[in-house]
Amino acid sequence: MPLHTLSRRDMTRLLAVGGLGLGALPAIAGPKSVPPTQRRFLFVYCKGGWDPTFAVAPMFDSPYVDLEGVGYTETAGSLEYVASWERPAVTEFFEAWSESICLVHGIEVRAVTHGQCVQLIMTGTNDIKADDFASTLAGAQPDLLLPSLVISGPSYTTQYASGVIRVGENGQLAGLLDGSALDASDQPAPALSADAAAAIDEHVRARAEAFREAAGARGNGHRVAADLEASLDRLVEVRALGDELDLSVTDPTDAYLPVSERAMPALSCLELGLSRVAMVEHTGLLGKNWDSHANIHMQSAHFQELFSDLLVLLEELETRPGPAGGSLLDETCVVVFSEMGRAPQLNAMEGKDHWTYTSAMLLGSGVRGAAVIGGYDPGLIGEAVDFGSGEVSDTGRRITSADFGATLLALGDIDPPIGEPVTAVFED
Amino acid sequence: MLLLALACTTAEDGEVRFEVLSDARLLRRISLDVRGTLPNLAELDAVEADPSRIETYRDEWMDGPRFEDRMVDVYAEQWQTRIDLFHVFWTEYAQLDDDGPTVEYSFERSVSDEPLRLLAHIAATDAPWTDAVNADYTMANPLLEEIWPLEREPGEGWTEARYTDDRPAVGVLATNGLWWRYHSTVTNFNRARVSVVMRLLVCHDIQAQSVSFGEAPSLTEGDSLENALREEPYCVGCHSVIDPVASSLFGFWPANEHSAPEIDRYHPEREKLGEEMLGVTPAWYGTPVDGLWELGPVIAADPRYDRCAVESMASGMWRRPIDPIEDAALLDRLEEDFVENGRRVKPLIVALSDTREYRAGDLGSAADEATVEAAVPVRLLTPDQLQSALWEATGFSWRWEGYEQLRNDQYGYRLMLGGVDGVYLTRPQTRPGMTWAASAQRLAEAAAYTAAQSLGTGDGLLGEVSTGASAGDDDFDEALEDTVRRLHARRPDATERQDLAALWSLGEDPAEGWTIVVTALLRDPEFLTY
């Protein structure tokens, strides 16, 4: 049984047999690094706009921020976070991983609607033709088989479309690859014989080549034709992997499958060196989404779910080997983020509305651990930051979504087209 | 007159920028764009004999039964109401219980398609585009009639209908489908909806405006968001425009956005709540309106309304974003023509299909850098076009458990095949990827298998092909040529004929042989692009 088919429940059971709970795992030292060109990325996107003050940004000293009653500031290593008996997973996570965590506070996403904010946090710009940071990182390594694997969540790309692989909300790609998708139809069709399928592949590939030659060397026709050829080649190669590559979802009918299980195919692709980037969306407890305009207290449940998932994912990353020889965590930068924050004050529905400042959590390859970059003023406005030291500074400036993306691109050895990297994020 | 103007334009710069498609491929493009299907052999023959028939067919097709359905798909790409989950589930409606879980998809698409059907109906019936915001009816199918407060004209499928809950007659602005898709939270007070109305109807994307709460002094001092929106000059700049429109929408403001009775009914008693809750009287960009009933006519009279209709349709038919500077001169003429023609959609489509950019099959030798980067002479078929074209040509429609698999992402392949969902992807994919190729492969195999079942039956793609025809004989060659022409609108050369015949020979029987051949043809770039 491939390791990635172990569910979180299986993992818990296995650990229990060994007399260990996840919380008892030893704290992990900062990861060894790989050259930026070999660095991989796992994006965990929290859909709907999280409230950092529930977990990663203690604001109890502010007179302007309405806070829950049960949270309090706690310290793990040198990091302060928000603890609560309702969210034991947050505490477990910070205790286990504080030396690896880099919190980036006060990222400014200069918009107020979800669509615009997602576009900005993913691309740093309003340009609808822009490629997102994940696609760009993957696009630098086009020879990988599955450069950017989208398990779920948003993806914006124009020039790197051929390298963005969508798994499908319920793992549909697996059915497309092995042909079982043909049965999921009111008009089912039998699979073609292997010989016929291979002959068609060859014929179509030749036709694509002829199409490219006819399209010339420039413009949209050339781009379509070139991407078509690349896509067909990829498809044949991926299919040739057979059982080595399992993109199936453990239980595709479970709409609320934990991210820790849903993301396992992504870890496999990172581990096998097939992908440079993977994206998985976290929709909170029971898929309720983080957009808490009413009952902000749902954030507590969402963070408990998120950090439970992250505990499993980080453990997996640490125990799996990476393609360059270290652990997968040594080679992977984990980026946990949301498109916006929540307003400091409760609204009439006991919820919080959209806010243009948010936080992100990075850890893993290339990231300075036990670090806090930036901060918030008492009104929850992002503070100006010295990008070199990460300290709040009157002579610095606020971190924009473009700067955040530039930081990620620099971690991946890409010169950012916009924004300025926050170099304080980088490990020494 | 417009045609002359466009011809003049193309003579000046179009000819050097673009190479025009062959007549047959142009016919195919137009057919896919206005009716979502492929031209048949008789139509291809007619155009081959007389290229002027292209325009005749185009006009006939726009008056035909498939045009309205096609327009639904066209507007779906722009209005993006076809999401997979609304805030209210079908289970809220006891009337639908008897239909079982397979009604879920019908419910979702009925809701999402209500506004699209109205827009498409306006286009198909040659009504003025101003009806989009002025019509005193909507469109409904039996499912919507069963669950919503409306009376529907008799008939199958979608027919005109009128709500019975005293909502104003403002076309699409009075449809549940639009407001279910673009819902408002209780505390958002319709503001997000306003930005959608502005973007879709007058092409003003107010959301694209940069917003920094750190530049709003009162917010930095701990003031509440709601106060700041009303009093803080930094916020009022935009909200002085947004809030008066939001104020006019309070008949649709929900006290609970997750409650079916709350959101499927209009609430006339709440119409004046906006003034109280937002502190402003209803208005559209400074023009006062007495309420929602007056908003439609005022929007239709906005000078940007006509331009937006033209730009939106042009962007859809050229398959690229509009460049407000590069495209300005041509759009000016198109807009002028649109108004002269009574703001009807069909003449607009005719005019757009006459532009050299629409008819381009390749770049011209002297295409400038901007054209090289922006123009889209090679287009990928959308999932909607694949759905309708394959259904018509092969009899295959990928459905499962009630879901149209090319029109949903929960279980299906819409995004994977390059479509848009309005949430994670808001613009169609213009270049193929591996997921696209994998989806296209299985779609081709399934459609080819279905097509092969029609072999020799007298009906369908291969209905006229004799089961006795085999590679090398005249019947086979003729069938092969007809099939390639039907699917690609071109004739195969000798090498391709040989290759396809070799593929056919791999089948253990004629049906399997044709399954293999048609699969190859449906995966061919000449089929998947147009």
Image (spheres, grey):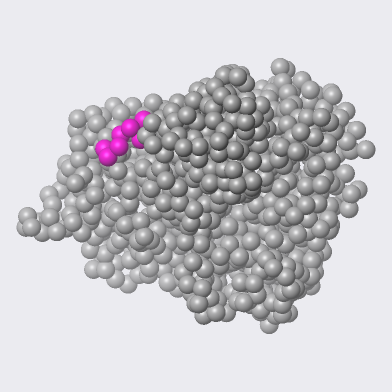
Using the rendered view, name the quadrant where residue B379 is placed.
top right
Q: Quadrant of residue A325?
A: top left
Count the numbered circles shown: 0
Q: Residue at x 60, y 47 (%)?
A: B457
Q: Is residue A379 left or right of residue B192?
A: left
- Predominant SS along the magenta part: helix
Q: Which quarter of the rendered picture does the C terminus of chain B lie within?
A: top right
Foreground pick, A222 / B402 = B402
* Residue at the limit of the structure toward the right, as seen here: B1
Question: Residue at 37% of width from left, 34% of height from top?
Answer: A194
Provide residue A420's location: percent of width, then percent of height.
45, 34
Above or below: residue A148 compared with residue B299: above
The spot of residue A424 in percent (x, y) is 33, 37
Relative to residue A147, is residue B380 drawn left or right?
Answer: right
Is A324 above or below relative to B466? above
Nearer to us in this view, A254 or A76? A254
Which residue is found at the position 17% from the left and 42% from the top? A319
Relative to the observer, which residue lies in front, A46 or A350?
A: A46
* Residue B14 image point, x, y percent: 78, 25
Q: Is residue B214 left or right of residue A304?
A: right
Does residue B251 appear in the picture of this structure? Answer: yes
- Magenta residues, start to end: A237-244
Q: Is residue A318 visible?
A: no
In the rendered image, residue A157, in percent from the top left (x then y), is placed at 51, 38
State yes or no: residue B199 in magenta.
no
Work out whether residue B512 or residue B484 is closer to the camera in this orientation and state it.
B512
Check the image and report above or below for B265 versus B385. Answer: below
View extreme (front): residue? B468
Establish if B141 lies above or below A275: below
Residue at image point 33% right, 27% down: A37
